[in-house]
Image (cartoon, rainbow, N blue to C red):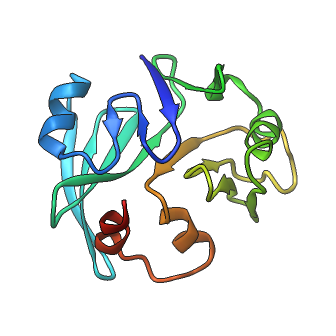
Amino acid sequence: MKYIIKPLVSVGNFIFNEQRSNIIQLVNLRLKGTEQKQHAINNYIIDDYEGLLAYYNEHNNRLFYVLFVPNLENELIFDKKNLFSLTSQELFELLSTYDSLTVEDYVGFGSKKLGIDVYSPNFTDDNNASIEGISFAIKGYFDSIYDDIPLNIDQLQAKV
């Protein structure tokens, strides 16, 4: 399936801040499972669609984060390129044209401005390390993560 990325807005039919019930109808994918998690003050609902996870704020059932893992069925299109077809270095260079990126030792890199995070273990030692996941989130999410600021999903969603 092809997912067009609109940073901080949507990844295909996964529209940030949209109601979970609407997204489930829009994406028309088989739901493998659902679980609830808590981290600090945040409560999540996580829908597993085999190859992608959608995270919703449990308080309002609105989407705030989506994680994709590489598979043959998913194409993540940004700037007319399939992100999973790029090497880590190529993806780093592409995202760098839009933002100065945050590089996390042994984890990967990401863009606060675009709301995109790339999980590429060992990227700091090997810039062609494999991409094991790409995440997308609402504005402010990765600012909290990279800058070690307490994450409050309710507050972030209220700003959108």
Is 36 positioned to the left or the right of 129 in the image?
Answer: left
Residue 64 shows up from this direction: yes
The part of the image, by quadrant, that contains residue 107 is: bottom right
Q: Is residue 86 above or below residue 46?
A: above
**What residue is at 77 percent from the left and 53 percent from the top?**
122
Q: Position of residue 33 (x, y in %)?
A: 20, 41
**What residue is at 60 percent from the left and 49 percent from the top?**
114
Residue 29 shows up from this direction: no
Extreme residue toward the left, this view = 21
Extreme residue toward the front, this view = 159
Q: Is residue 27 above or below residue 91?
A: above
What count of labels does the image hold?
0
Q: Position of residue 41 (x, y in %)?
A: 29, 81
Between 105 and 6, the one nearer to me in the picture: 6
Q: Position of residue 66 (x, y in %)?
A: 40, 45
Quadrant, the C terminus: bottom left
Between 54 and 34, the one nearer to me in the picture: 54
Is 53 positioned to the left or the right of 118 in the image?
Answer: left
Q: Is residue 25 above or below residue 15?
A: above
**What residue is at 56 percent from the left and 42 percent from the top?**
133
Q: Position of residue 150 (x, y in %)?
A: 46, 83
Quadrant, the N terminus: top left
